[in-house]
Image (cartoon, rainbow, N blue to C red):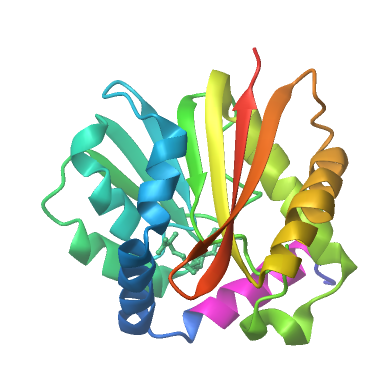
Amino acid sequence: MKKDPLHAILEEVRDSWGIRSPDDEHWQAKRRKTAGEYEWVLENLALKQSDKLLDIGCGTGLFLEYINEMVDTSIGIDISETMLKRASRNLAYKHNVSLLRSAAPLLPFCKPIFNKIVIVHAAFGVFIPNPHLWNIYNEDMMDLSADVIKNAFSLLLPYGVLVLTLAPGSEDVGEKVKQKLIPDAMKKAGIGTEDASVTTTVRKLESTYFALVRIEKKS
Ligand SMILES: C[S@@+](CC[C@H](N)C(=O)[O-])C[C@H]1O[C@@H](n2cnc3c(N)ncnc32)[C@H](O)[C@@H]1O
């Protein structure tokens, strides 16, 4: 039976992450944390203890570990079994975190239940093609980004906040993310100014440029 395009892309994404070393990924995540990426996300989240937080593409769980004491409930989702195994080792003694294997935009929730959602450095290689995914990059993947945002946004409670970060690398590409890619993705996701306030910021952290998108649901 022929697979539908979404499942076919997600299988490729899963396989491309499945062959990467979780130890290397954990090391990269630590580097980004040191560079200030997590702190920047935190500034934009304004976490409250009672928040229910979802981390999409949680990888080896470093962000969940970082905010563990700050919220009562958090859930990490990742497409890769290998990354999740490493995450469950890192979070073994944290009793308020759950990990699930699932793929955005096909998340296993059907109504708004989260106040805060993050997609930290896991824009799935689609806003800006990730070198690991270049061989499969195509226009459908832009639709995947929009679907991921749409799906995440649908799970946000009123006044909830979705923060996503990505690494455009250079200031020019960062500006393109801000001026074009994010507005296009929001449009494709069907989220207008009446639904959400959206701000995109580009910042240099250590030697490279990052972009942070903050989407706050209006009601
Ligand atoms: C660069 S890592 C970032 C991990 C983590 N957020 C951090 O800050 O360290 C990207 C993660 O996204 C996951 N991922 C990629 N596409 C996904 C999808 N469609 N749904 C869920 N997870 C996905 C990968 O398996 C990988 O663990």
Q: Is residue 88 left or right of residue 31?
A: left
Q: Residue at x 15, y 57 (%)?
A: 92
Q: Quadrant of the C terminus?
A: top right
Residue 60 x/y as whole percent: 34, 66
Q: Which residue appears at 75% of the width and 71% of the height? A: 8
**Residue at 49% in and 80% down:** 18
Q: Is residue 111 magenta?
A: no
Q: How many marks?
A: 0
Specify the quadrant of the image occupied by residue 155. top right
Picture layout, residue 130 above or below residue 79: below
Identified at 62% across, 64% down, the residue is 124
Locate residue 168, reporting x and y percent. Answer: 65, 68
Question: Height in image: 135 above or below 185?
Answer: below
Q: Nearer the viewer, residue 50 or 1?
A: 50
166 or 55, which lies in front? 166
**Image quarter hosting the N terminus:** bottom right
Residue 114 lies left or right of residue 106; in this view the side is left
Where is residue 51? Give x, y as percent: 35, 25
**Residue 112 visible at all:** no
In the displayed orientation, state which residue is furthest to the top: 219
Q: Position of residue 180 (x, y in %)?
A: 84, 53
- Find residue 31 and report its image quarter: bottom left
Kindly report the secondary structure that dominates the magenta region of the rendered protein.
helix
Q: Which of the pair 13/171 is nearer the observer?
A: 171
Q: Is residue 153 visible?
A: yes
Taking the view exactly as shown, the residue that stands out farthest to the left is: 93
Look at the picture and state if 149 lies above or below 70. below
Residue range of the region highlighted in magenta in the rendering: 6-17
